[in-house]
């Protein structure tokens, strides 16, 4: 269990639910809460990129498998095969390499470009690693109380629904003024939703 995950776990158990025997349920609630908060908007901090190289040579129409942790696509661009792998994404588009169209079908992306290429970059909104050993949520780092409150709400739904509603109200929504989600959204105003 890494330090951030332990901090959230302790906040849920000791600071909110006082239910140390619900280890499995608490772990599940923390993971669900983290994914739910990240999925509430398309935050720039969740942008990731994957370079996909097509082994069949250059062509104008492709089908390739989506990255595993992808929740939604920001853009798909054709790239030169000599482009270095990306570390951080910039949101500027180069019109020479824009994809004519793409669509998602199941776990695949189908794309077409005007000029032949053999590589694409998929910029997408991903999910953080929520495993206990590698937990890495930027929301949990900046707003641990939001994750802990949402996890507590999910746990309280099992045995005290009225208390759960109080915690759900604290977490709130993006559009409700003084809630955790509104604060996260407001302070990370580069969100794309």
Image: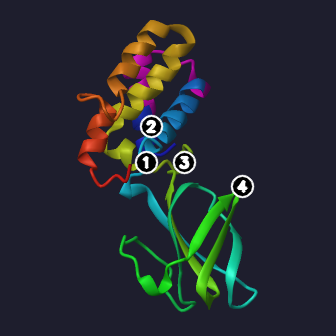
Tell me: 66 left or right of 162.
right
Give the quarter of the image for residue 181.
top left
Q: CA distance from mark 2 to mark 1?
A: 13 Å
Expressed as whole percent of the image width and height from the top left, the position of residue 125 reads 49, 57
Expressed as whole percent of the image width and height from the top left, the position of residue 131 reads 57, 45
Q: Is residue 50 above or below residue 117?
A: above
Magenta span: 9-24
Residue picked out by circle 1: 137
Residue neighbourhood size for the residue with mark 3, other residues' Cα within 10 Å, grouped as few (<14), some (14–19), many (≥20): few
The residue at 58%/31% (across/down) is 28
Contact, CB < 8 Å: mark 4 with mark 1?
A: no
Q: Secondary structure at mark 3?
A: loop
Number of numbered labels in the structure image = 4
The residue at 49%/47% (across/down) is 135
The answer to which of marks 4 and 3 sits earlier in the sequence is 4
Contact, CB < 8 Å: mark 4 with mark 2?
A: no
Q: CA distance from mark 1 to mark 3?
A: 12 Å
Q: CA distance from mark 4 to mark 2?
A: 36 Å
Q: Nearer the viewer, residue 49 or 110?
A: 110
The answer to which of marks 4 and 2 sits earlier in the sequence is 2
Please identify, in this view, whether the residue under mark 4 or under mark 2 is nearer the observer: 4
Q: Nearer the viewer, residue 141 or 82?
A: 82
Q: Is residue 20 magenta?
A: yes
Residue picked out by circle 4: 106
Residue picked out by circle 2: 6
Residue picked out by circle 3: 133
Q: Nearer the viewer, residue 3 or 127?
A: 127
């Amino acid at each position: 269990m890494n330090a951030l995950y332990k901090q959230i776990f302790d906040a849920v158990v000791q600071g909110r639910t006082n239910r140390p025997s619900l280890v499995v349920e608490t772990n599940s609630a923390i993971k669900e809460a983290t994914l739910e908060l990240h999925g509430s908007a398309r935050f720039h901090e969740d942008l990731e990129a994957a370079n996909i190289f097509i082994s069949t040579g250059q062509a104008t129409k492709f089908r390739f498998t989506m990255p595993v942790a992808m929740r939604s696509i920001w853009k798909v661009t054709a790239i030169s095969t000599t482009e270095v792998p990306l570390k951080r994404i910039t949101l500027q588009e180069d019109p020479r390499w824009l994809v004519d169209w793409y669509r998602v079908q199941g776990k695949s992306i189908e794309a077409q470009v005007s000029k032949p290429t053999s590589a694409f970059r998929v910029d997408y909104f991903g999910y953080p690693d929520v495993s206990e050993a590698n937990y890495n949520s930027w929301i949990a780092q900046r707003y641990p109380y939001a994750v802990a409150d949402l996890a507590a709400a999910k746990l309280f739904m099992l045995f005290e629904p009225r208390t759960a509603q109080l915690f759900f109200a604290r977490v709130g929504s993006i559009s409700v003024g003084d809630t955790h989600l509104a604060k996260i959204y407001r302070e990370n105003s580069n969100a794309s939703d």
